[in-house]
Amino acid sequence: MQTWLLELWAAPAALGFALLFNVPPRALWLCAGLAVLGHAARKWVVFLQGDIVFATLAAAILIGLIAEWWSTRRNEPAIIYAISAAIPMVPGTYMYKSVQALLGIASLPATDSGQALLVAAGVSGVKAVMIVLALAFGIAAPLLLWPKRNSI
């Protein structure tokens, strides 16, 4: 399968979360499009030798900016577009690896040292937390940089 086709799998995930969050049907296509665009942007930054955390931050900022721009045109909150589009980028693999390494430590005999497993759990856990923070800051960036125009 072509590698760019894999990015299209972000659309069903975003649509599933959008339906779960009761996003209006007229906004579903943009949620799916933003998810694919965000995944493609993250993959492009990683392809250009960027770190996965920085790539996720760049993709989340792109999602946040487009969601904010679109929401002003539709007079709807940007969060309905941005959150469901960003959820497919949650670092499930890194979370899984972290928990798997911790469970590996728990199953070691008392005489063995679990130092390598502990390091693997820590690295994967820290990376997962940083990716989640990058998603949060990236989505919130437009609101932090450009406050609402109608606020007092």
Image (cartoon, grey):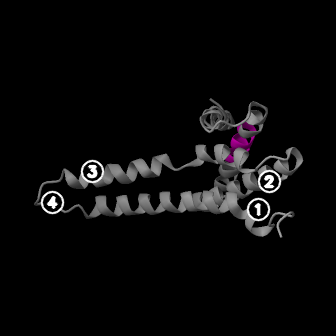
Residue 50 visible at all: no
Residue 36 belongs to magenta span: yes
Q: Nearer the viewer, mark 4 or mark 3?
A: 3
In this figure, which residue is indicated by the disc labeled 2?
Answer: 68
Q: Which mark is residue 112?
A: 4
Tell me which label, 1 or 3, sits earlier in the chain.
3
Q: Which residues are magenta?
A: 32-40
127 left or right, relative to 69: left
Q: Residue at x 64, y 54 (%)?
A: 46
Give the Cα separation between the discs numbered 1 and 2. Answer: 7 Å
- Counting from the top left corner in percent of width and height, residue 22 is at 65, 36
Q: Nearer the viewer, residue 89 or 139?
A: 139
Tell me which label, 1 or 2, sits earlier in the chain.
2
Q: Which mark is residue 142?
A: 1
Give the Cα separation between the discs numbered 4 and 1. Answer: 50 Å
Prevailing secondary structure of the magenta residues: helix
SS label for mark 3? helix
Q: Is residue 14 above or below residue 115?
A: above
Give the Cα separation between the discs numbered 2 and 4. Answer: 53 Å
Q: Residue at x 66, y 51 (%)?
A: 42
Residue 49 placement: quadrant:
bottom right
For label 1, the crowd category at 10 Å Cα-Cα, with few meaning under 14, some 14 to 19 and many 20 or more, is: many
Q: Is residue 152 above or below residue 4?
A: below
Give the Cα separation between the discs numbered 3 and 2. Answer: 41 Å
